Amino acid sequence: MRGIQSLNGIDRRTLLPTLALLPALPGTLITAAAQAGAPGGLLPSWSDGPAKQAIFDFVRATTEQSSPTYVAPDDRIAVFDQDGTLWVEQPTYAQVAYCLDRVPAVVAKKPELRIVDPFKTVLSGNREAMEELSLEDLETILAATLTGMTVEAFQSEVSNWLETARHPRWNRPYTELSFQPMQEVLRYLQSNAFKTYIVTGGGQDFVRVYAAKTYGIPPEQVVGTAGTTKFGYGQDGKPLLTKEPKLLLNDDKAGKAEGIHFMIGRRPLAAFGNSIGDREMLEYTCAGRGARLAMLVLHDDAAREYAYGPAAGLPDGKIGTFTPELYEEAREQGWTVISMKNDWNRVFAFEA
């Protein structure tokens, strides 16, 4: 994918490694929406059709002991991309929004940055100007907002941000913008002894802050782009970890398959994605023997969420790119393309 030099056109593989160098906070609670059962039958937010049936068929094929493709519980692994697959990724990634929101705090500590771009542009609040920030500009912002933070400082900053930040379209916390149909798939697989993992191109430790509360997935089951940390001692003599500006794992495209082996050590049976960043993860999953499930979310519902592709004649969303070539590969390989418009009768838990 060609590199795009504006905020809404960031090359995912180039930017996300820079986002990643972040420490983690283990979550412990599951949201009320995630705890709730599935009234009206299994997967109630899914419309009846091939996509919903493919999930049922896969679970039956892998969990019924009489099935020739039965899989023991210890080997039941399912992986999920996050941005655009489990929650909203437009108009920009939540993690990018976090870093931009951190700029005022950075400038407060270093007032000389107030008159220097790109900080000056971000402080202006001019959204059009911010959308024209180059990748180099964003890397400067990320380095200034993240470099040298301790694990504890990062945990506190992200937790506080999640409590106050609101999505510009729905004016709701980002953690309320997870897709209800995918929440139901997570619960359904977990109830059938599948261990569910998030495998994201975003910062591993950023997602670990809220994964348990939002998705019911503990931090040790989050695989993402990650940087190294450095052990040291604080002024009080206690040991601590600080973020190092050195990339450990670029968990996007081929890096997703590599990250799965590195962090999980088992080939998944099921993989869910939504973009070209997930292609290799789905290919790796389906290269194994026995029953496999590969699904891609197509964002084709501008009324309830967003419409972008450019597959199926949809606009090019720049981030979360679903190309015609990926659509054709899905058709050839037997992967299921989920139409948000047609396969989901409900997108968010807060919908009436």
Image: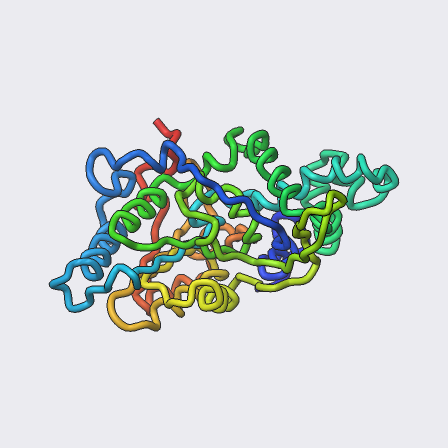
The outermost residue toward the top is 352
Residue drawn at x 42%, y 67% as measured from the top left = 265
Is residue 82 or residue 329 the one in the foreground?
82
Q: Is 326 on the left or on the right of 42, as rendered?
A: right
Residue at position x 20%, y 34% in the image: 40
Quarter of the image where one finds residue 36:
top left
Judged from this view, the residue extending furthest toward the left is: 66
Please state the horizontal and vertical placement of residue 225, each as a whole percent of the image. 56, 58
Q: Nearer the viewer, residue 88 or 206?
A: 206
Q: Left or right: 51 with respect to 200?
A: left
Residue 127 sits in quarter? top right
- Horizontal and vertical percent for residue 131? 67, 45
Viewer-closest of 261 and 45 = 261
**Residue 325 seen in the current view:** no
Name the residue rendered at 76%, 36% in the picture. Answer: 123
Residue 237 visible from this viewpoint: yes
Q: Residue at x 49, y 69 (%)?
A: 258
- Foreground pick, 175 / 87: 175
Q: Picture coordinates of residue 156 (x, y %)?
A: 62, 37
Q: Quadrant of the C terminus?
A: top left
Q: Is residue 339 left or right of residue 234?
A: left
Extreme residue in the front direction:
237
